[in-house]
Structure formats: structure tokens, C-alpha cells
Amino acid sequence: MSMQFSGKTAFITGASRGIGEAIALRLAAEGANIVVLGKSVREDPRLGGTIHSVAQKVNEAGGRGLAVQCDIRDEEQILSAVQETIALFGGIDIVVNNASAISLGGTEELDTKRLDLIHNINVRGTYLVTRHCIPFLRKGKNPHVLTLSPPINLDPRWLGPYVGYTISKYSMSMMTLGWSEELRKDGIAANSLWPVTTIATAAVRNLLGGDALVSRSRWPSIVADAACHILSKPSAICTGNLFLDEEVLADAGITDLEQYAVSPGQPLQKDLYLNQ
């Protein structure tokens, strides 16, 4: 490892498992301070992982971990998490907006409670986390905001089946494009990242397709490696992109992607919002 993130502080939402955990450990292996944000302080056997277990893994990987219980629907909890981060690490260099809620129901299926949950986490929560970190990112070293959201694909095949969820994820991507322009003068990069295939996470197993879909997925490490490559780029010039993980890795010279497959040699399931 190059230790290129040594001394830098990454503020990662939804970091108690899955993609958030993978990004946290990847950056920790290169010396980063990691703020592990999430709601889970007691392990749910169906999901696995807590903010404390991930913070411990961060320390073991070579970084410094800080576990902070934070529901990003609550602005006061976000403010408290930022203050705790600054008190321990002195700054914020990277924000990873990974926390997200999913429900693929149609308009009549998606009730008000679920709709509010999706938008309060995906849109409002992402906005507030970024907003309260900006003053510290301005002082950061090569500052980046990286949001886990897709390319904006207006093909009706993606808008039609699950309007409520789709507009929340596209809103995250539109915020990326907006922040890229707004924060350009401050040298703060804003990019999004999305996997080409489904990723083997608890959400995929429990909510989308069970073990059958997991077997056609890739491990979260592919997203973590892509994220690391993006975050290493100069923030002044690498901004305003809605990246796909395969494209990022190709740019990094990584073309053998079988290493990331849950079942090497087997067909893979394309992720949402990608036509090809």
C-alpha cells in the first residue's frame, strides 16, 4: 500500500457494513483516519456489523477509527458527529455519502412512510451531511465528496417501475453535479460512483434477490478500490463525474475483474439504471 491517505480524515456514512465498510477499510489500509457513521451499535444477525466492529477493523488495518452513532435524518446528530470528528482528528478531507435506503415498489405500493424514509436518507441526509462538512473540506488536503449514486438515465424503463426510489437516487447525482460547480472555486471535488453489477451486500440478499442474486454479484471491494482511485485524484480537476466502477478501475490499469466476482466465471447481474 502507498499510504497516500496517511493523516487524512474520511467521514463515511452507512459504514457499519457493505460498501461503506469496504471503503473504510480500503482507505484505512493506506493510513486514513476513518469516521465510521451509522445507526448500528448492536449486531443484527441478518445484517452483520456495527459501527464499533468496523472501527476496530479500521484500527487493525492501519488506520485510526472513530465510531459515531448517527442517523443522518437527524441534523443535530450530524452536527454532533462533525464536532466529534474535528475534536479528535482536527479536520475532514473526504466525505463519502454511502448511506441509502431502498424500496423498489411502484407508486401505489410505496406508502408515505417509506417514501419519506427514502427521501429523508437519500436526499435530505446526503445534503445535510455534505453541507455541514463543507467548512472543514475547504481547509482539507485534496478534499473530495464522493456519493454512491448512479448515472442519470432518463430511459422510461428505469423511471417507470419505481418512481419514488429512482428520483431519490437521481437527486443524489444531481447534487453531485451541483456541488461540483458550486465548490469548484474552493478546490473541493464532487463525484458520484455506481457499480456496473449488483454488489453482494445485506440489502441485495435480504431485499432484492436472496442468495441467487448474491451469487451473480461482485464483492464490495470493487467499489472500494474504485473509490480509492477517485479519491486519490487531484480534487481541482477530478470533479463533476458520475463514475462507473469498471471505468474507474480501467483508468487505474485494473482490467482483471474476476477477482471481484462472488462466483468467478458465472454470469453477472447488471445493476439498476444501466441499459448496456
Image: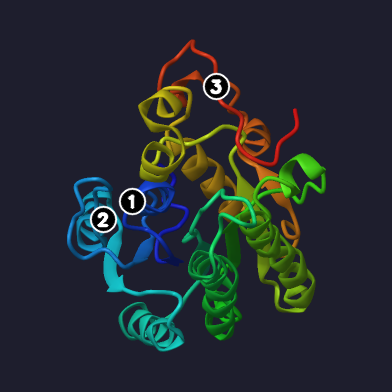
Residue that badge 3 annotates? 268
**150 on left or right of 17:** right
Q: Which amino acid lies under the numbered mark 3 shown in the image of this protein?
A: Leu
Q: Is residue 235 visible?
A: no
Q: Secondary structure at mark 1?
A: loop
In the foreground, 42 or 26: 42
Q: Which amino acid lies under the numbered mark 1 shown in the image of this protein?
A: Arg
In the foreground, 202 or 89: 202
* Tag shown at residue 266: none
Q: Is residue 56 above or below residue 275?
A: below
Mark 2–mark 1 Cα distance, whole angstroms, equals 8 Å
Q: At 38% across and 37% down in the image, what residue appears?
A: 205
Cβ atoms under marks 2 and 1 closer than 8 Å: yes
Mark 2 or 3, nearer chain start: 2
Q: Is residue 99 above or below residue 129?
A: above
Q: Is residue 10 visible?
A: yes
